[in-house]
Amino acid sequence: MDIAVLLFVLVGLGAVLTIQSRVSQADQRVARVERKLDLIIDHLGLRHEDPRMGEVVALLRDGKKIQAIKVYREITGAGLKEAKDAVEAMA
């Protein structure tokens, strides 16, 4: 009976690792597609600039970088690292 439990645990662990690997691969494919779509949108000039981006620039001018990052994240839904990089690129 102990061997059956051990075998069951090993099979379960293998299944979890396989699923995790496939999810990781899917995430990588989605990221590649998003990058390509961003390039197409930029090429076609279809970017819609949010009116609140001016607020981000104003906060940067006032030296309020952290608040600028917070507002940028609210506007775009970006993660912390992505927002920080984007706001620093604006400076």
Image (cartoon, rainbow, N blue to C red):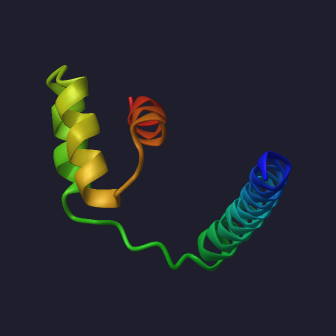
Number of marks present in the image shown:
0
Q: Position of residue 25 (x, y in %)?
A: 80, 60
Q: Residue at x 30, y 48 (%)?
A: 73
Give the residue at x 39% y 37%: 80
**Point 75% across, 52% down: residue:** 5
Horizontal side of 50 relative to 30 (left or right) equals left
Q: Nearer the viewer, residue 78 or 21?
A: 21
Residue 14 position within the rendered picture, expressed as x and y whole percent measured from the top left: 83, 54
Q: Is residue 82 above or below residue 15?
A: above
Locate residue 11, reporting x and y percent: 83, 58
Q: For residue 15, what is the image quadrant?
A: bottom right
* Left or right of 17 on screen, residue 35: left
Residue 37 drawn above or below residue 57: below
Q: Which residue reaches farthest front?
A: 1
**Front-lying residue, 67 or 2:** 2
Q: Left of 57 or right of it: where is 85? A: right
Q: Residue at x 38, y 28 (%)?
A: 91
Q: Is residue 42 left or right of residue 16?
A: left
Q: Nearer the viewer, residue 19 or 76?
A: 19
The residue positioned farthest toward the top in the image shown: 63
Q: Where 54 falls versus 39 (above or below)?
A: above
Residue sitting nearer the eye, 83 or 46? 83
